[in-house]
Image (spheres, rainbow, N blue to C red):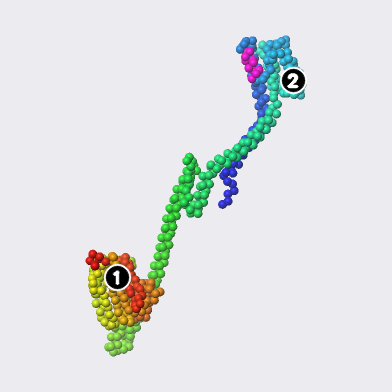
């Protein structure tokens, strides 16, 4: 958002406006009320002097030395000319050394008072009259008081009124100079003060902008003298830290949610794929069982040999289905962690020998030779599950052995583990299929797998068993065949 006015400019305009307004107000007051105020002050000075003289007459101190001092003070402080006359026009007291000259001036003032154009009555009482007079000869204004004291004597008092209009003009001109200087000083001061004020605010503005862009590295640095802005800055730092933590937690939660969604989608995909594969695998044996069962029911062949053949097919297909279901249950228990491991120490060579011996008839039928190490190798694992791994590897090797028809079991000993390798001569597995052979129901050669009754689950069980042991398994092509391997923990104390 584009800012229209900066705080610095607003503060400067405000302070300059206040100074200018103050000067203009002073100019208006001077022009309007200063003259009246000055006249009232002069009038009060005359009245105060009149009452002081009258009081001295009443107290009979008019001729005392003490009153002489008071009389001089009245004349000098108020710049007042005073003349006290007896009823027969004898001068009783005068503020001037030349009493006659002062008397003549007052007589002239009396003449001026008779001219309505040259005088203006300001105030009238039984004891005195105050007039504003203009001396045409001197072109000056005066305030004149005519009064009668308690003893019947006449008092004449006069004070000059300076040219108040000229004074107002001079004062206003002075105010103009003051206004210019004050405006310049105010502008400089406003910029300095506003920068002191707006500096932290601008810092907070930049921080808030970076926070809006999710950048929480910027922190407010408070001044030595703490104020409300610094307190706001500290709260901004706290808000920044809280937002950073919260957004980080939200991102982590969002990532976890994405993973959960992906996992759910993957599980859903696997579930659909699993149902499709199971349906496909069960479809063929169920069709065969149904077909041969209907043939028996309809007595297509009445001879005993045909009936036995039909029954053998039905039993063979039912056995394949039973084996596949058992393997699926085993795989399900392994994948969901429902099957616990029984870790024990056993001789791996004895286990390999037992698996080879149990497959002896099948090996003899297919004219396959098998070699394996004779030395004892002790490992730590679940013997029953390792036997299942070895059985799957050997069964897989028997079904795919070709050319020389030879199977070789070897050990690769490491510091704390042993790798068991099962190699069979034959055609290699296409490289693009190697990563997928561990997936459920994946078959490289479907026709051949169907021929020997494979379900595509055996290697998935092997992988699940090895993952439960936190060990690895794998397969690789060799020059004249394929090698499958898995690793187990060695019992180093009893192995050479």
Q: Position of residue 271 (x, y in %)?
A: 38, 70
Q: Position of residue 56 (x, y in %)?
A: 63, 13
26 vs 200, left or right, is right
> What is the magenta range?
67-77
Q: Residue at the location (66% across, 22% down)?
A: 43
Mark 1 lies on residue: 412
> Can you say which quadrant of the picture contains the C terminus?
bottom left
Q: Residue at the location (62% across, 15% down)?
A: 70
Local SS, label 2: helix
Quadrant for residue 337, please give it: bottom left
Quadrant for residue 117, please give it: top right
Between the C-alphas of marks 1 and 2, the distance is 142 Å
Identify the mark nearer the N-term, 1 or 2: 2
Query: How many numbered dots are placed on residues in this image?
Result: 2
Mark 2 lies on residue: 113
Give the main secondary structure, helix, strand or loop, of the magenta stretch: helix
Q: Position of residue 460 (x, y in %)?
A: 34, 71
Up the image or down, 113 lies above or below 416; here it is: above
- Can residue 97 be seen here? yes
Q: Residue at the location (65% across, 22% down)?
A: 44
| Residue 71 belongs to the span the image colors magenta | yes
């Amino acid at each position: 958002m584009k800012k229209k006015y900066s705080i610095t400019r607003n503060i400067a305009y405000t302070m300059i406006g206040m100074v200018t307004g103050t000067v203009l107000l002073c100019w208006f007051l001077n022009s309007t009320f200063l003259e009246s105020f000055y006249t009232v002050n002069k009038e009060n000075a005359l009245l105060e002097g009149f009452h002081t003289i009258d009081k001295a007459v009443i107290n009979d101190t008019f001729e005392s030395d003490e009153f002489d001092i008071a009389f001089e003070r009245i004349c000098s402080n108020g710049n007042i000319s005073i003349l006290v006359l007896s009823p027969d026009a004898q001068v009783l007291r005068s503020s001037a050394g030349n009493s006659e000259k002062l008397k003549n001036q007052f007589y002239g003032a009396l003449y001026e008072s008779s001219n309505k154009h040259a005088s203006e009555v300001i105030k009238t009482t039984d004891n005195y009259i105050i007039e504003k007079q203009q001396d045409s000869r001197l072109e000056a204004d005066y305030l004149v008081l005519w009064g009668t004291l308690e003893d019947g004597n006449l008092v004449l008092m006069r004070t000059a009124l300076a040219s108040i209009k000229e004074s107002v003009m001079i004062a206003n001109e002075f105010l103009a100079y003051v206004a210019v200087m004050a405006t310049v000083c105010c502008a400089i001061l406003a910029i300095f003060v506003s920068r002191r004020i707006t500096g932290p605010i601008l810092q907070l503005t930049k921080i808030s902008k970076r926070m809006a862009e999710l950048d929480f590295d910027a922190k407010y640095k408070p001044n030595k003298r703490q104020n409300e802005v610094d307190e706001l800055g500290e709260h901004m730092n706290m808000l920044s830290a809280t937002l950073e933590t919260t957004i980080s937690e939200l991102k982590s939660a969002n990532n976890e949610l994405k993973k959960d969604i992906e996992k759910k989608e993957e599980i859903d995909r696997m579930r659909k794929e699993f149902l499709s594969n199971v349906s496909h695998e069960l479809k063929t044996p169920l069709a065969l069982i149904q077909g041969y069962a209907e043939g028996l029911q309809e007595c297509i062949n009445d001879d005993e040999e045909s009936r036995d053949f039909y029954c053998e097919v039905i039993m063979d297909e039912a056995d394949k289905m039973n084996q596949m279901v058992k393997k699926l249950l085993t795989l399900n228990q392994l994948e969901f962690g429902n099957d616990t491991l029984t870790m024990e120490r056993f001789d791996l060579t004895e286990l390999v020998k037992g698996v080879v011996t149990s497959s002896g008839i099948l090996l003899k039928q297919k004219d396959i030779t098998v070699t394996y190490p004779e030395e004892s190798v002790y490992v730590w694992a679940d013997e029953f599950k390792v036997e299942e791994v070895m059985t799957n590897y050997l069964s897989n090797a028997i079904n795919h052995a070709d050319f020389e028809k030879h199977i070789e079991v070897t050990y690769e000993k490491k510091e704390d583990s042993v790798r068991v390798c099962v190699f069979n001569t034959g055609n290699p597995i296409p490289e693009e299929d190697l990563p997928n052979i561990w997936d459920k129901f994946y078959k490289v050669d479907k026709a051949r797998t169907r021929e020997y009754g494979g379900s595509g689950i055996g290697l998935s069980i092997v992988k699940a068993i090895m993952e439960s042991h936190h060990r690895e398994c794998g397969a690789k092509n060799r020059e004249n065949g394929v090698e499958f391997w898995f690793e187990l923990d060695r019992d180093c104390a009893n192995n050479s």
